[in-house]
Amino acid sequence: MIQIVPQKPAKDTRVVVAMSGGVDSSVTAALMAEAGFDVVGVTLQLYDHGEAVQKKGACCAGQDIYDAKRVADTLSIPHYVLDYETRFREEVMEDFADTYLRGETPIPCVKCNQTVKFRDLLGTAKDLGAEAMVTGHYVRRVEGPNGAEMHRALDHSKDQSYFLFSTTREQLDFLRFPLGDMDKAETRRHAQRFALPVAEKPESQDICFVPNGSYARVVERLRPGACDPGDVVDLEGNVLGMHDGIINFTVGQRRGLGVAAGTPMYVVKIEPDLKRVVIGPKDALLCEAIRVTEMNWLDHAPLTDKPRRVKVKVRSTTEPVDADIYDDGDDIHVKFVQPQAGVAPGQACVAYEGDKVLGGGWIER
C-alpha cells in the first residue's frame, strides 16, 4: 500500500493523479481511489486537438482527454483539463526542433517530464491542496536512509527511470509511482478488474506530437528551411552523396543514408554548421568517453574528481554498462569500461548503482 502522509487517514489525504487517458495512468487513479484517497484527476491539453485527434496512440490529444474523462466518471472522481499548449510548445516542441538542428538527437519525453509535468503540473497539484502527485510511470520511489530514492521498475522491460533522470530530490519527495512494482500484464488485469473503459487500449507512441513518426516533418514545420540539402561524406571528407536535411539523420543510423558502399555504413557524426553527414564503418562508432552537462545528481554522496564505478545507460533501449564517472571541476566525465557504439549527442546519460538511480545529464557533442 502506498503511504502518503504517515498516521494520516487516506480519506483526509488529497492526491492529484496525472491522467493521460492511457491504461497506466487510469489504473493509477483507480488504485488510489480504491485505497480511499481524496483523488483529483488532471489531464494536460498539450497540443492542437484537430491534428492530434486524427492520430492513434497520441498522448494528451483529443481522444485521450475524452478517455481520461470517461475513466474519472467511472471512478467518480473530479477531473480537470489544463491548457498547457503554449508551455508545451515552448518547452518541448521548440527544444525538439532546435536540438535536431544542432545535429543532436532529442528526447522530448524527458523535457516534458522536466518542465511541463514535474515542474508546472506539480506546482498546480500543490495549489490544489494535494499532498502528493501520483503518476503511472514504471519506476519505484524507495525511502532510503537519506530520503526518497528513485529506483528502476521491478519489470526492467517497462522501466522508465531513464526518462525521469531530471527529477529533483524535492520533486521526488512529492511524487508517488504505484506501478513500479508491477509488470504490464498486472496493470491490464487491474484495468479489467476496475472495468475501466480503456482496459484494452493499446500502448501510446513515445513521441506524442509526431504524426506518423515523421520527425523531419515536425521540425520543418517549426523551423522552415530545416531540410536544406548537404553532403554525405566519409571519414576523410570525401563526398559520397547528397542528403535532404541533417534532421533526417541521427548518430548510429544505418538505413536511408542514400549512398552505395561495399560495406555497411553508419552515421558517425553530424556537422550542422557545414550541413554535412559523416558516415563510416561500425567500428568508427565506438566511443570511449563522453562529457555530460546539466547533471541532476540524486545520490547523497556528491561526485568528486575521484572516478566512481557505476552503471550507465546512454540510450533508453540499452541495458546499463560499466563506467567510471567523475567531476573535474569544470565538466562531468564518463569513461566506459568497454567502448560503446552509437553514443549520440542530445541523448541522456543516466547513472545507476544496482537499481538505484544516482543521477543523469545530457550527452555533449
Image (cartoon, helix red, strand yellow):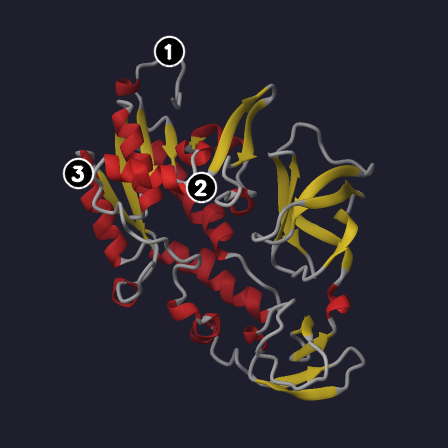
Label 2, secondary structure: give it.
helix
Is 213 left or right of 277, judged from the image as shown?
A: left
Where does label 3 land, which residue? 74
Residue 245 sits above or below residue 139 on the image: below
The numbered mark, 3 or 1, whose residue comes first in the sequence reads 1
Is 81 left or right of 311, judged from the image as shown?
A: left
Quadrant of the drawing holding the C terminus: bottom right
Q: Nearer the viewer, mark 3 or mark 2?
A: 3
The numbered mark, 1 or 2, whose residue comes first in the sequence reads 1
Residue 134, image quadrant: top left
Q: Which dot marks residue 7?
A: 1
* Amino acid type shown at disc 2: Phe
Where does label 2 land, which residue? 118
Residue 286, image quadrant: bottom right
Which residue is at 57% across, 79% downward? Answer: 256
Callouts 3 and 2 close, C-beta under 8 Å? no
